Amino acid sequence: MRLPKPTRLRLTSQIVFFLLFFFLLLRTEFRGSFSSSSSEIRLPHPVALFFQFDPLVAISNALASRALYQGLLWCLIVLIPTMFLGRFFCGWICPLGSIHHFFSNWKSERKRGKQLLESNRYKRWQTTKYYLLIACLIAALLGTGVVGWLDPFSLLVRSVGLSILPATDYGIRAFLGALEHSRFGLVQSLGGILHFILGRLLLSFKQPYFRQGIWLGVIFIFLVTLNFRITRFWCRALCPLGALLGIVSRWSLLGLVKHPDHCNDCNRCLLRCQGGDDPVGGVPWHQAECHLCLNCVDECPERGLQFKFFPADHSIGANLQRRKVLTGLAAGVALVPLARSTPGYAAETNERLLRPPGALAEEFFLSRCIRCGECMKVCPNNALHPATTEAGIEGLWTPVLIPRIGYCETSCTLCSQVCPTGAIWEITAKQKGWPTEVADSKPIRLGTAFYDRSRCLPWAMATDCIVCEEWCPTSPKAVYLRPAEVVDSSGNVKQVKQPYMDPSRCVGCGACEHACPVQDRPAVYVTSVGESRSRTNQILLNRRKT
Amino acid sequence: MPSQDPLTRREALLKLLRVTGAGAGAAGLGVWLAAHSTRPQATAAITIKHGHAIAPDPQLPQMAVIQGEDPALLARQAIEELGGMHRFISRGDIVLVKPNIGWDRIPEQAANTNPAVIAEVIEQSLNAGAKRVLVADVSCNDPRRCFQRSGISESAQKAGAELVLPDPSRFKEVDLQGEMLRAWPVLDVFLNVDKVINIPIAKHHSLTGVTLGMKNWYGILGGQRNQLHQKIHESLADLADFMRPTLTMIDCYRILIRNGPTGGNLDDVLLKKTLVAGTDPVALDAYVAKAYWNLDVDALPYLVMAAKRGLGTYQFEQVRTSVKTLA
């Protein structure tokens, strides 16, 4: 029986993991189910699986918390074999790598003939990723999870989940809408059928909107277009996970052996090399750069290349310059004090920094959150969005709850279920005060709601309303009503019910702000003070007892 | 010396024709576009046949109040008392069952309709020959959670109904032809069915005092229905006028006595083990409001408004009622 070509195996593996990643990403959403009413609502699939296998996330988590959050121990499945075999993960598994690989194969003006040859040799700037890795790891050690800006899975979920997929949704819905509003019955039926199929496979339950969506999309597309200049530029120059795996593969038992007597300098191996590790004859091979794509072995017509265990050839590991290492260290060290000595962290908490339920106190949160966007993608109300400056510069792309867009469902704990690092520590619905009575339990609070009486209908416009009270999910309600006599603009005296807020009952879910008919700037709004994760960000004295 | 032969007359003519054609086309297109310049209007609201009531029958009761242990049996008996399901559902009908699935609450919290009651009504409809039974509501909380948490997803599916979750693309702008409410987005499933059965749950509500049958029609609307609170009584009368149901069944098995309509605390729930059904939606609301909240019609202006429009009578004592207690 003839074994399939190794490169074909590799391609199959890439496709399988790519499809798996996208399946899990599409399923990072509560689709509703017909199971019983009293069961906890959990996602049926382990959607954050890829993060659990990510050694970069695990090591950063360990440095930041001196512990390892549930599930991250699985990274050993990737880390240990990499030590033995090399960066097979980059070549065979990584879905971001596969995306870059795919686009690198496109015909490009810049990568033709001699230009392609020269561009595909090992380049010194490939060491940049090691310095980025060092900066990220030091930053993690000092307490900030900015490694998530560069971690490949974090990047993929954030870019695709919060930008590309919503954009695709929008486009598909617009197209389907055009079909379904057509004058021709046949076209309408076609639209209906397509809507049904795509609704099952691809579309979200409802169109999601994410702040900064366009920037996340643009950055991702930009990174992908870099492949038209240099094959797999991200993987070679920027990816800190690739750098990490490159460093630990220095003890690899597997290596590339070049047979110079077979080589006729055709350069076919160099043309198709993915990692930029110089498989050509005449120069040393860079172990730490190789993705084990096996293209070189496949291409060589003279059988001049071979991967062997315990290779005799000397290969070059990650080639780090001392000065640059120190620069990386310094950057990582400087980032934290610089970021935190400006307001937005300690001196002044942004009032609108509402964190997801289950979020740790801010200093712990910032050190663990890898800004991956899983929580934002899964939130059924589209309530969580990537922060800009609400949490300072280092808080970029951490999750913020924006009640005007979506409020926090009382019983929902989905964000805490998908958070891979425990920045949102997994909680139960009971801890959110559901379904038990609020009076006895101490539910998690996200903040407190306040009334702007100058905009509220019964306070300022002599008009009945109290939608806020209707929606308030606590029992007894945090919103209480008092009848009042008001005079309208024509001088008529009316009786209205005016709402008041009891901060000791309010959990800060934002349902009131979301439901308020004064939709541009709601007359009732939630600010972070009173959030249960912070001991200091409180108003009420009697909260100190808890 | 010219390097090419000069253009033949034929070529020159063709060239002239082409350019003239292009110019005429551009001019024509321009004229047509200019002639069609009008200020953009929002999509016109559609006017639609509404009202699903059946003919009254002076021999049969108009209201049935059934008490007992099993919620499904209460529903079954109530329908029996009112003349049997065949009075309401004809063979081949498309039936819409409208529960209250507004909130992310379990059945014990009495914020949504009892799932056993819904299942029973679905079964009865199918047995009476309905072609399809649909279950729909435009929930307040996330519909996926509400449908599941209320238990109605499971029970309705088991009974053979089709669930219709509110999809933003399925709302149509409809002229409700009311005194207060004109053009409003309505979930399309409510617009083209043969029979509508309204099955709310009895709850406290701070603005109207109670939320019963007529207020359940909120669940057909999308858009900014939070504005309706400003003229709640007129709005409720308008909605009831638009959706004249075939049958109303108010679930009083568990009622939410305070902190409605969301509730949450089990202490706010009273187990009444009752179902009140009938063909006069005004009388039903008036009866339940009086029976459990001791509210008279002067506290419920929307009932007076509805009665004025011929939707029923708020004087429930004058309505033919059948009261039964099951074992």
Image (cartoon, coloured by chain):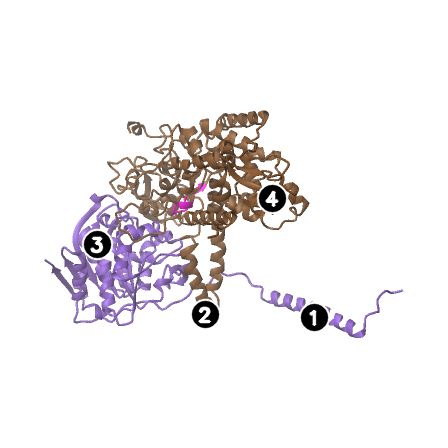
Chain colours: A brown, B purple
> Which one is closest to the eye, mark 1 or mark 2?
2
**Residue that sits furthest to the bottom in the current view:** B10
Residue A236, given in percent of the width and then of the height, sits at: 56, 38
Chain to which the residue tagged by mark 2 belongs: A
Q: CA distance from mark 4 to mark 2?
A: 56 Å
Residue B148 pos. (x, y %):
30, 52
Callouts 4 and 2 on one subunit: yes
Residue B21: image tag:
1
Type of the residue with mark 3? Ala
Residues at discs 3 and 4 in contact (Cβ within 8 Å):
no
Mark 1, Cα crowd under 10 Å, few <14 / some 14-19 / many 20+, is few
Which residue is disc 4 drawn over? A269
Give how far across and how far down residue B229 sits, in percent: 34, 52
How far apart are the alpha carbons under marks 2 and 3?
Answer: 48 Å
Say above or below: B147 vs A439. below
Is tag 1's residue or tag 3's residue first in the polypeptide sequence?
1
Q: Which mark is residue B289?
A: 3
Q: Is residue A471 magenta?
A: no
- What residue span does the magenta drawing correspond to? A377-385
- Please, what is the three-letter code of the amino acid marked with disc 2? Gly
> Does A398 sit left or right of A484 as displayed?
right
Q: Residue at 43% of width from left, 35% of height from top?
A: A80
